[in-house]
Image (cartoon, rainbow, N blue to C red):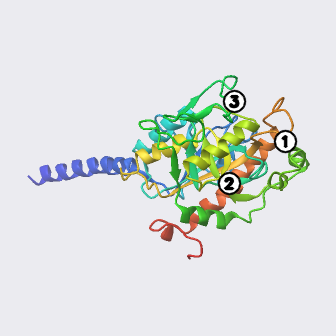
Amino acid sequence: MRAWILRTLVALAALLGTVVPALAASRPIPIKVVVVTTFEIGADTGDVAGEFQPWVEGWPLKKEIKVPGIRHVARYSDDGVLAIVSDMRGRTRESVAALILSSQFDLSKAYWIVSGIAGVDPGAASVGSAAWARYVVDADPIYEVDDREIPADWPYGLYSNDADRPNVKGKAEGSSAMVWTLDRGLVDWAYDLTKDVALPDNPDLQKLRAGYVKEPQAQRPPFVLQGDALGAVRFWHGTHRTQWARDWVRLWTDGAGTFTMSDCEDQGILDVLDAHADSGRIDRRRVLVLRTASNYTRPPLGEPTFPRVLHDDGAKAAFEAEFLVGGVVARDLVKNWGRRATALPQVGAR
């Protein structure tokens, strides 16, 4: 009898020896900061950088993990920072949803930093600058009339769903919330923490902004600011489209927002985050959008839109600015996690 009991205890010990580590390994990895980038140019390290590489090398993020539903391998660190490449435009939605629904991570207390390059309104800032968004506005649900056929008194052929002319707020039921407001206290804190970060300037950037002689913000060396993001899956450029973007952001934010950055993903990311806001998987208040300027949304006044819109020098500066600015916020969140885990940081609060 004693022998049988002994054999049983040995068997149970062996079983526990395999089950307990397996259970431990399956526990979700607690994440403090999620960084969402939208593309990488080549490898994650060691070559020409895109949006992802500055975070991978700068943090550094040494561990790789495959997340089902996300095409690019994710990277994370032992101190709780996770970064993904969501891919661009429509693919962003499915990638962010896949991350939220993954059982690999505990994101319930995580802060989100959407980190990507964008076009900048030369009336708001210069190439190489970095803007923390207060509002994200959706420009995808829209009616469009061929610009060659618009009524003579219309400024452009773009207008709201269920409206009958431009600059009238319509509806987007079943399509989009149209505007998302980020936590003002958190945005103010992130800006205050980074407003004095020195961003790189060089003769190439000075040459890019030289034509904007009548626009003082476009003439400034790169700087950090607060400015709002307009998301549309189509790439656009030009003087009339920039005026439309200004009007569209002002319209949907009831005059509170200022068009600053144009990108292709923020509206999708915020839409998915809102869809999961009540699930307990994420904290929707802990979301920051940081866009860095790689190009102007229109040419200098009086000059033709083409032949060139994008510039390698501007993109390089924007990639670098992402981590220079966003990394400061991420490091504070991780360093002070004892406080940040339970309460959002505020300007002036310890």
Q: Amino acid at mark 2?
A: Ala
Identify the residue position indicated by label 1 in the image.
Answer: 300
Q: Is residue 224 left or right of residue 157?
A: right
Q: Is residue 170 left or right of residue 144?
A: left
- Residue found at the very far front of the displayed protein: 153
* Secondary structure at numbered mark 1: loop
x and y percent of residue 168 in the render? 55, 41
Q: Can see residue 204?
A: yes
Check disc 1: other Cα within 10 Å, few if <14, some if 14-19, many if 20+. Answer: many
Q: Can see residue 52?
A: no
Check disc 3: other Cα within 10 Å, few if <14, some if 14-19, many if 20+. Answer: few
- The residue closer to the viewer here, 334 or 3, is 334
Q: Earlier in the sequence, mark 2 or mark 1?
A: 2
Picture mark count: 3
x and y percent of residue 117 in the render? 69, 44
Q: Is residue 109 left or right of residue 240?
A: left
In the picture shown, does residue 51 fall above or below 191?
Answer: above
Identify the residue position indicated by label 3 in the image.
Answer: 152
Disc 3 to disc 1, C-alpha distance: 25 Å
* Secondary structure at numbered mark 2: strand
* Secondary structure at numbered mark 3: loop
Disc 2 to disc 3, C-alpha distance: 36 Å
Q: Amino acid at mark 1?
A: Pro
Q: Say which residue appears at 67% left-offset and 40% top-offset.
A: 244
Q: Tags 3 and 1 in contact by the CB under 8 Å rule? A: no
Q: Amino acid at mark 3?
A: Ala
Identify the residue position indicated by label 2 in the image.
Answer: 131
Quarter of the picture holding the C terminus: bottom right
Q: Earlier in the sequence, mark 3 or mark 1?
A: 3
